[in-house]
Image (cartoon, coloured by chain):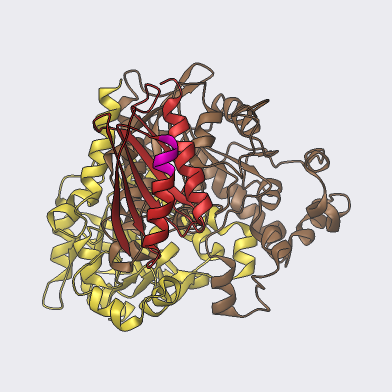
Amino acid sequence: MEQFQVRGTTERRAGGNRDRAVIGVNASGNLEVLVERVLPDSECLVDVATAVTGFGRIWEAVIQEFLERTSPGGLKFSINDGGARPDTVTLRLLQSVRLMEDEA
Amino acid sequence: MSNPVQPNEADWYEASARERIDGLLDPKSFVEFLGPEQRAVSPHLAQFDLTGAFDDGIVVGRGRLDGQEVFVAAQEGRFLGGAFGEVHGAKLVGILRAARDGANNDGPRAVLLLLDTGGVRLQEANAGELAISEIVDAVVKVRSAGIPILALVGGRAGAFGGGGIITACCSRIVVSEHARVSVSGPEVIEINKGVEEFDSRDRALVWRVCGARTRYLTGGADRYVKGSIRDFREAALALIRNAPSFDLVTLVAEQQRLMERLQRFGDCRDAPDIWRKMGLPEPERIAELDDDAFLAIRTKGADHDAR
Amino acid sequence: MTLDEVLAALFPAGHEVVRGPSGTLHGTGTVEGQGKITVVGIVGGTPLGVDGAILLSGHVLSVVKADQHEPIVVLIDTASQNMARRDELMGLNEYLAHLAKSLALAAANGHRTVSVLYGHAAAGALIATALSAQSLVALPGAEPSVMDLPSISRVTKLPLDQLKELSKSTPIFAPGIEPLFATGAVTEFWGRDQPFANRLAALLREPPLTSDQRDRTGLTRRGRLLARKIADQVAEEARAHA
């Protein structure tokens, strides 16, 4: 099992006024993402727990690409991973930001 | 996004626990207790090299069903098979005790249990087993306080093991085609008794022995619905209105009902043998009918208040 | 211990117990301070299936109907639930639930219920019998389990040696009296040197239990550190949102 964090600085605060959202399930090929608006606007953080070890560099790349794409300032993403493929990770992260942009 | 599926038109089987609650209850009425942001997770999984779930695989809270206050618990069947662990089970115990405690004031009109479970989580076997017994105790107490408890079963995991026992403790049971309700899993029977006794890879057999249609036709479920979340909602609304009370009269009637089932069908080897004895048309085809055709079958005596 | 030894030790003043089909038994036993109490049981290591369960629930409901409020002792040396196609086809879940409900009804109607485990009980049979009474007494030779370690090893893919090692530091999954005592399932354990009849009389003299305290017991005994707290937290949030 691995647990690691990827931090980022962001130019803008993530839109919307929701405090938190959760998407996905920790199941085979899937992942659970809990996102919380708890950080300063210029910061974001992705906290990953995964039972599949050895893919740290791919996680890093996927997450950095997501952070650059969405600039989710103020958001903390916590992940329980069940062995998802990179594109599923990206999908869930994007879904979670979209949920936060919805009306509370 | 254009033309999104309305939450309650979505398929129950495909939906997550949260999506089922969202589609089942009145829009925006759900308030979750001990939600994922509180991180009430299992402390027992790391030693098995397993990651967890922020809600330990069960969502509990309150909401409204056609304006009526209800308490809800929904298991996420895809997380560790929806199995009962210490925290998971305790959340369900807690919502049931809350229902019982609220019964004399503004307590809920009903409790809805969206069960989707393979039974006890073996990594936490004793805690899971105890939780199931505590849930049975709590279900009885809630029912004794006059609050109906509905079991809604139609997900990937079914209601196995202790989940099957809890199901049959509820006031009313709703199933859809995907549901299996059973105690021992098919694989366990095969391992213990051999493939002749139960070929666990024979899916059709699994559904004939444990599946929703058999449960419904033998009186083991009160409603059989087509698979949308709205279908479950409509069934729940109807069944809340006439749930059996938990008392000696009901249990004596259930004793009679269950004894009669054994007397009539106790030497049947497979479901079609039961349908034949019931006088149903084309017993061998019943498993293959579509839901509309299945629902058109009229059976005598399947409806009862003895639960 | 054999069934006869257990009966003699529990009811030295006398008992009239009849064996029935499917490993069941029923009858009465005399307890000091209580007179004749009801005894039911599933014995001989017989798995609990639809046939045994419906007989047991029938005995329990007869007692409730008679409305004499005497205690009910459930003697248990079973196995797991009966693993058979026929039982599942008949809806075993309903029969086990019905037995659990019948025992719960008896308790609610003023019958003190005590399960006495002197042999095996596992999984669904454990739930429907031993765990469905207000108090669970374990005697020497009692072997409660949810599942045996080799099967847990197969399902969880953790090697058996590792599981055995793990079970030394946590009572949360392993079979046996000690883990089930620590987690709150077992109310009392009576060793061979204890006078069972006196212990039973004392247990039955205690005021009736009005609520399920097993999770609190699990917390006190440190076998289940979270269950009670989590249940209380959920109930508290529900109250706060009223």
Please identify which colour was used for chain C in the image.
Answer: yellow
Q: Does residue C23 lie above or below B107 as drawn?
A: below
Looking at the picture, tell me which residue is in the foreground, A10 or A87: A10
List x then y, in percent, for residue C126.
38, 64
Answer with left or right where residue B259 lies relative to residue C133: right
Answer with left or right where residue B207 lies relative to residue B118: right
Please identify which colour was used for chain A in the image.
Answer: red
Location of the C terminus of chain B (image quadrant): top right
Q: Is residue C82 magenta?
A: no
Which SS type dominates the magenta stretch?
Answer: helix
Instruction: Tell me which chain appears brown.
Output: B
Residue lying furthest top? B67
List x then y, in percent, for residue B17.
49, 41
What's drawn in magenta, residue-wise?
Answer: A66-70
Residue at position x 39%, y 41% in the image: A67
Instruction: Specify whether residue C101 is in view.
Output: no
Answer with left or right where residue C181 lies relative to residue B60: left
Residue at position x 48%, y 46% in the image: A90
User: Residue A57 falls in which quadrant of the image?
Assistant: bottom left
Residue lying furthest right? B282
Q: Is residue A68 magenta?
A: yes
Looking at the picture, tell me which residue is in the foreground, B78 or B196: B78
Q: Does residue B149 lie above or below A103 as drawn?
A: below
Location of the N terminus of chain B (image quadrant): top right
Instruction: Specify whether residue C108 is in view.
Output: yes
Q: Does residue A20 lie above or below C192 as drawn?
A: above
User: Residue B43 falls in which quadrant of the image?
Assistant: bottom left
Residue at position x 23%, y 72% in the image: C139
